[in-house]
Image: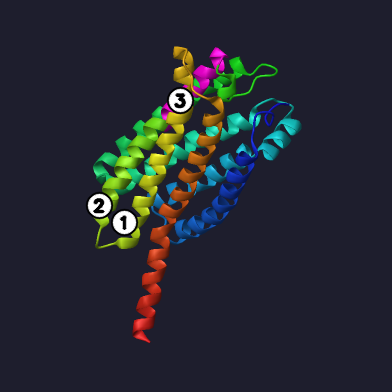
Amino acid sequence: MNSTSSSTPLDGLIFGVCAVLGAVVTAACLYRARTTPTVANRCITTAFGICTVGVAFAIPAVASWAEELTGVDNVAKLIAHICAILWCASLQLTMVDIAYDPEYLRTAIYQRATVASIVLLVMIPLWLKANTPGVEFTTAFAANVPVRVYLLVYLGYVFLTCCELAFMCGKSANLNWPERPWSSFGYGSSATAAVAGIGYTASKGGYLLAYTAGSPWSLGVEERLSPSLSGIAIVFLFIGLTLPVFGLAFRKVRRRLSRA
């Protein structure tokens, strides 16, 4: 079993904190989805639940436990990456429901679900081909061509998704200001998260592309930078998608106090 051999203490700290935050936020979103069962609220709840599971499997200790339990090397990495794909797709559907006209909604959902399904259908065979003894699905194994291709497919999808989310969240932040400040700040925070996600994919994907071109930069820099950007993206997204909930609760409390 080898999932933790190239991990750093920073990985466990960042992903552990994010997993705890994810569990709390998922519970809050589940309550909102039950009280206000819209497409967006259900997608947000699904996204946070999937994200929390994926982040938990990115914790080195949990990854090691999963491998010991299943007897399969890198199974935790595959689960974390599948969760990331499903998380991104759920966030896309959330923003599509919020940002687009109802007549376009069904088409937009089918388009994004189809792309996510194709990416998963490509990734899983690549993972099976590359998952040989002693191999890890990290940039440290960029010399392994199947690993490199697998990571580039995964990172490419996340990059494109984050670009779309940054655009839609930024646009929604502008449209909601100043009438709905809580929503505006929430979308702004989500846009920041998407930008951090772009940085994460650029850090990892850029290293892999530079390695392919024969001029990679310091692996140590990438291994420190990427987890930090990933953690920033997750935290800002948690904040961004829960701010509207707190804003609604704040307005309700203020109305009750004004009537008292």
Quarter of the figure with the N terminus: top right
Q: Which numbered disc covers residue 45?
A: none
Residue hosting label 1: 184
Q: CA distance from mark 2 to mark 1?
A: 7 Å
Whole-percent x, y for residue 247 in the image = 38, 65
Given the image, on which type of amino acid does mark 3 rest? Answer: Gly
Q: Position of residue 126 (x, y in %)?
A: 55, 18
Q: Quadrant of the C terminus?
A: bottom left
N-terminal of the pair, mark 3 or mark 1, is 1
Report the residue marked by disc 2: 174
Q: Which residues are magenta?
A: 143-158
Picture layout, residue 74 above or below residue 182: above
Residue at image position (48%, 56%) is: 29
Q: Between tags 3 and 2, which lies in front?
A: 3
**Which residue is found at the position 54% from the left and 47% from the top?**
49
The residue type indicated by label 1 comes to Ser
The colour scheme of the drawn protein is rainbow
91 and 178: which is toward the camera: 178
In the rendering, which numbered label is found on residue 205? Answer: 3
Q: Earlier in the sequence, mark 3 or mark 2?
A: 2
* Element at label 3: helix
